[in-house]
């Protein structure tokens, strides 16, 4: 996946985190797609929903966009997703991409 492809996938995502990630990407942020493997959205939901609940239980402020990302991973069910990271000047983003790499399922 190239920069243009990732920008296009993020542009289809209306979440606040995706818009912020897209802005960082367009400003020249580094990105990496972990293309060697996929995971089911359900598996990722299990992991991230648990992390989110632990943060809430321990009064740790969750990452921006985490709650919405958890909801979207749940909605994606058993779909296979790729992970990408965008490291910008202000923060680091995790992007969950559809198996065909054309849309962002969730971003945090």
Image (spheres, rainbow, N blue to C red):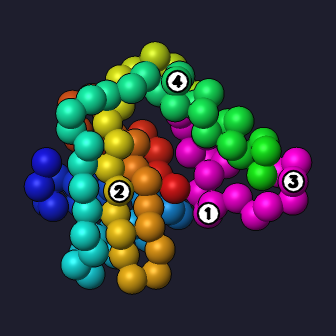
**Lower sequence index among marks 4 and 2:** 4
State the image quarter where residue 61 is shown.
bottom right
Q: Earlier in the sequence, mark 4 or mark 1?
A: 4
Q: Which residue is mark 4?
A: 43
Instruction: Name which quarter of the figure residue 71 lies in.
Output: top right
User: Dot 2: within a 10 Å radius of its alpha carbon, few (fewer than 14), some, or many (20 or more) residues?
Assistant: some
Q: Position of residue 27 (x, y in %)?
A: 26, 81
Look at mark 3 in the image and give the residue it sits on.
Answer: 58
- What stretch of residues is rendered in magenta? 56-73
In the rendered structure, does residue 71 fall within the stretch colored magenta?
A: yes
Can residue 14 be seen at all in this image of the molecule?
no
Where disc 4 sits, the SS reads: helix
Relative horizontal placement of residue 57, taking residue 81 as reference (left or right) = right
Earlier sequence position, callout 3 versus callout 4 = 4
Residue 81 lies in quadrant: top left
Coordinates of residue 22 in the picture (x, y in percent): 34, 67
Q: Nearer the viewer, residue 102 or 38?
A: 38
Q: Is residue 43 above or below residue 95?
A: above
Residue sitting at 43 percent across and 54 percent down? 94
Mark 3 and mark 1 in contact (Cβ < 8 Å)? no
Give whichever of discs 1 and 2 has the lower sequence position. Answer: 1
**Does 48 appear above or below 63?**
above
Mark 3 lies on a secondary structure that is: loop
Q: Closer to the observer: label 4 or label 1?
A: 4
Judged left or right of residue 52, residue 42 is left
Check disc 2 and report the residue beneath it: 85
Local packing at callout 4 (Cα closer than 10 Å; few below 14, some 14-19, many 20+) is some
Residue designated by label 1: 64
Task: Name the spot of residue 7 as percent of width and height, x first.
Answer: 24, 60
């Amino acid at each position: 996946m190239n920069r243009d492809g990732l920008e296009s996938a993020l542009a289809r995502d209306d979440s606040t985190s995706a818009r912020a990630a897209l802005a960082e990407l367009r400003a020249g942020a580094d990105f990496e797609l972990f293309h060697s493997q996929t995971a089911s959205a359900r598996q990722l939901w299990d992991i991230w929903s648990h992390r989110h609940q632990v943060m809430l239980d321990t009064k740790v402020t969750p990452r921006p966009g985490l709650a919405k990302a958890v909801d979207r991973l749940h909605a994606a069910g058993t779909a296979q997703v790729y992970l990408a990271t965008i490291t910008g000047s202000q923060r680091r983003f995790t992007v969950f991409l559809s198996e065909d790499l054309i849309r962002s399922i969730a971003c945090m």
